[in-house]
Every structure is written in C-alpha cells, then in structure tokens.
Image (cartoon, grey):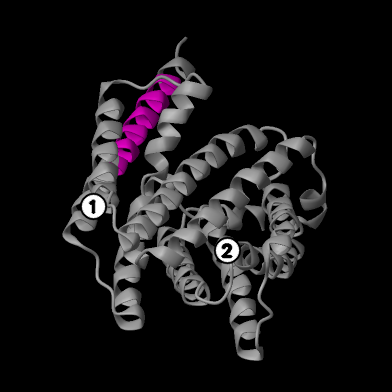
Amino acid sequence: MAQSLTSHRPALAVGLKLTALMLFTLMSALVKALSEDFPPGELVFFRSLLAIPVIIAWLIWRGELSQGFVVKKPMGHFWRGVLGTSAMGLTFTGLSLLPLPEVTAIGYATPIFTLVLAALLLGERIRIIRIGAVMLGLVGVLIMLWPRLGSTEMEVAATIGALCVLAATIARAFVQIHIRQLVKVDHPAAIVFYFSITATLLSSLTVFWGWTMPTLDQALLLVVVGLIGGVAQILVTSSYRFGQASMLAPYDYTTMLFAIAISYFWFDELPTLAILLGAALVIAGNVVVVWREHQLGLERGKARSLTDHKP
C-alpha cells in the first residue's frame, strides 16, 4: 500500500496539483468577496477551524493520525503557526484591497525570497545562475509594486494592500525555511495538523478587534472557505506523492489563468500590463531556480553513482 502511494504517476500528480490550485484560487475569490463584510482575522479563523475536520479525516484515512498528534519541537510548531497565520492574515488583507490577479502575481515571489533566506539563515550556497534568477525575480516584484506607490487616498489603500501581500510573501518564505527544519524531527502530518490548530487559536484573538456576526448565507460561505482550503491542502500534499516537486512546480503559475478568469467574470477586474510583465519576470526567475535545482540534482546523482561503483 505504501509503495503505491509513493509511486511515480505523473498524470495523477498533475491532476491533483491543478485541482488543488484551482480550489485555492476559488477560496481566495471567496475570501475577497467576504472581506467586504468580515475582518481578515475572522476569515483566517473560519478558514483554519473548518479545515481541521477535513485534515483529521485525511489523517485517519492514511493511518497517520497518531503521527499527527506527536511532536518533538512544540515551540517550532508554535512559531510556524505564528508565521503562517501572519502570512494568511496579510494575504486576506491584500485581497480586500487589490484585484485577485495582482495578489496572485506578487505571491509568486515566495520561492525567490525562500532562496535568499536559505542563503542567509541556512548557509546554503547560491551560485551565479541562481543569483541572476533572484535579481530577475526582484525586478519583477518592483515592477508590480511601482504603480502602487501613489499618494491619493485610493492609491494609498492599494499601496497598503500591495505591501501586505509582499509581507505575506516574505512570511511564507520564512515558513518554507522553518518547515525544512521541522521535517527533520517531526512527521509532515503533525506539521499540517498543528498549523491548523495554532492558526485557529491565534486568529481567534482578533475577536477583541471586532468581528461580524454572519448571516446564514454568509456562514455557509465561511464553511465552504474552510472546507475548500482543507481539501486543497490535502490534494497539493498528495500530488507530491505521485510526482517530483521539480516536475510539478511550473504548474503553480496556472493560478494566474484561474485568477484572471475568476476575477473577470466575478469582480469585473483585469490585470494591468505592469502586473503581467512583473509576474512574467518573477515566473522566469522561479523557472530558472527550478531548472538549476534539477541540474544540480542530476549532477549529485551522477556523483553518487560514480562513488558507488568505485572498486
């Protein structure tokens, strides 16, 4: 059974990843629509709380519920929760102030910042190719942010939204670095489960800044947000059991297509030329990073092969 769950089935992996990405984009659109009536902290609370039953059911089905409860670094999970909850809250704030495609495009910078933080915090070496990729990605981010650096009241709100999304992107990069350390001692099931618990508890503290009592229709939408988020998280996690990360990474950028379509038909919004150009540069930088990681993996594989066959 375990072997089949980790087999190489690229078509299934791609299908799971694309479905997850479509659901995440739909969830973001629902959050954007609900943000007119609910503060970001309340939205984070329902997104996290209602994902917990889905995650528990998934862990039971996989026989990993016991691993999901056991942790060796509880404070590590706490700080992962703080970073992840902050990223989610900042993203939801950005969604209330910016078009969906713009939030999606700025979010593509996460791998670029992760690479930078890996060099600064983990001492990972970055050679000239990846340095160039980082610079290309940062230029793309600057192009996307530049039109938002205005002075009118409407532009100031958009600037705040863009800066919130940028801060969320950096926070997610810290999360990626933090998870690299957590997986060395704790099971991935525990990381997923305790993040939902921590995010629920932390976001509940925002009740003191004012929450809105939902109507029945709004409550149903909040339930849908949480369920979609939980299902999407499971699908994207499962996709990596059937395909390599380097193969699946380029599909992340299909979210721009989903975001443009949903934003056009739902919110009557279209991305600006600056957003499309900036996103293209960020995507190009990420693709270079993925390609370079793949090349380095092949080189390490060849080196191990030569070592293993030495007399």
Mark 2 = which residue? 40
Q: Residue at x 36, y 30 (%)?
A: 298
Q: Which mark is residue 300?
A: none
Residues packed near mark 2 inside 10 Å, few (<14), some (14 to 19) or many (20 plus): many
The three-letter code of the residue at mark 2 reads Pro
Residue 140 picture location, percent across and down: 25, 44
Image marks 2 and 1: residues in contact by CB distance under 8 Å: no
Q: Residue at x 41, y 62 (%)?
A: 14
User: Would you say residue 212 sits in the magenta stretch?
Assistant: no
For the record, the magenta segment spans 286-305
Q: Residue at x 54, y 50 (%)?
A: 87
Residue projecting furthest to the front: 152
Mark 1 = which residue? 147
Residue projecting furthest to the top: 311
The three-letter code of the residue at mark 1 reads Pro
Vertical placement of 65 versus 113: above or below? below
Q: CA distance from mark 2 to mark 1?
A: 25 Å
Quarter of the picture holding the N terminus = bottom right
- What is the tally of numbered marks visible in this picture? 2
Nearer to us in this view, 127 or 224: 224
Question: Callout 1: helix, strand or loop?
Answer: helix
